[in-house]
Image (cartoon, rainbow, N blue to C red):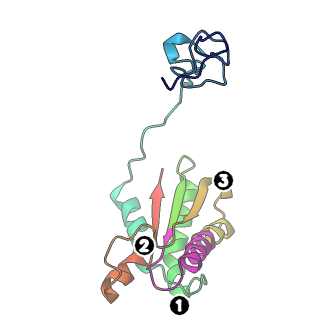
Amino acid sequence: PGITVSGSGCPLDTDQDSVYDYLDKCPLVKGTKANNGCPEVEKVQTITRPPIQLTPEEQKILQDVFENLEFATGKWIIKAVSFPSLNKLATLLITKPNYSLKISGHTDAVGSEKANQTLSVNRANAVKAYLVKRGVSKNKVEARGYGESQPIADNDTEEGRQRNRRVEFNIF
């Protein structure tokens, strides 16, 4: 019962791979019995480089950028107070050709989700654009915005909202 059969009462094998459709995980694509009727996937060897070990001085540069990065309220205009620490980050990325940077923009939950998503993307991209103007290769910097989707504190308090409005930096 519940198994689709042919006119002669035999279970169907639509892709003709000798695995009946009711047992076939990929009934429309020819595969192997060993892989439950799905095609074998060629294993691709990925080359991963070891994680970057930052020196204490490099960690301080990242921490200073995190602590000193300021934007105009509700905008993605970087305030001038942020420039010295961003300049140090640019110098670090230029002098270390094996370093790449991921910039992650985040907001609090005040306002619409769509507006917060846009703001976080624009702020991350503003930081990337600033670093590129300072000589960092655009291919070494990834900018992403996450809006209000990844809070690190309670959005019901001003202190929590302040902590959630952030741009994070990860060197890899």
Residue at 36% x, 54% y is: 55
What residue is disc 3 on?
139
Q: Quadrant of residue 11?
A: top right
Q: Which residues are magenta?
A: 105-127
Q: Report how far apart the C-alphas of labels 1 and 2 lie in the structure.
A: 17 Å
Are the residues at dot 2 and dot 3 in contact (C-beta closer than 8 Å)? Answer: no
Residue at 60% x, 81% y is: 76
Rendered location of residue 89, percent (x, y): 51, 66
Residue 66 is labelled as 2
The kind of residue tagged 2 is Phe
The kind of residue tagged 1 is Thr
The kind of residue tagged 3 is Asn
Rendered location of residue 119, percent (x, y): 58, 78
Categorize mark 3 by other alpha carbons within 10 Å: few (<14), some (14-19), many (20+): few
148, above or below 140, in the image: below
Q: Quadrant of residue 20?
A: top right
- In the rendered image, is residue 166 in sight? yes
Residue at 51% x, 78% y is: 84
Rendered location of residue 44, percent (x, y): 57, 25
Q: Earlier in the sequence, mark 1 or mark 2?
A: 2
Residue at 37% x, 61% y is: 59
What secondary structure is found at the residue carrying circle 2? Answer: helix
Q: Report how far apart the C-alphas of labels 2 and 3 lie in the structure.
A: 21 Å
Q: Nearer the viewer, residue 126 or 144?
A: 144
What residue is disc 1 on?
73
Q: Nearer the viewer, residue 106 or 149?
A: 149
Rendered location of residue 160, percent (x, y): 32, 81
What secondary structure is found at the residue carrying circle 3? Answer: helix
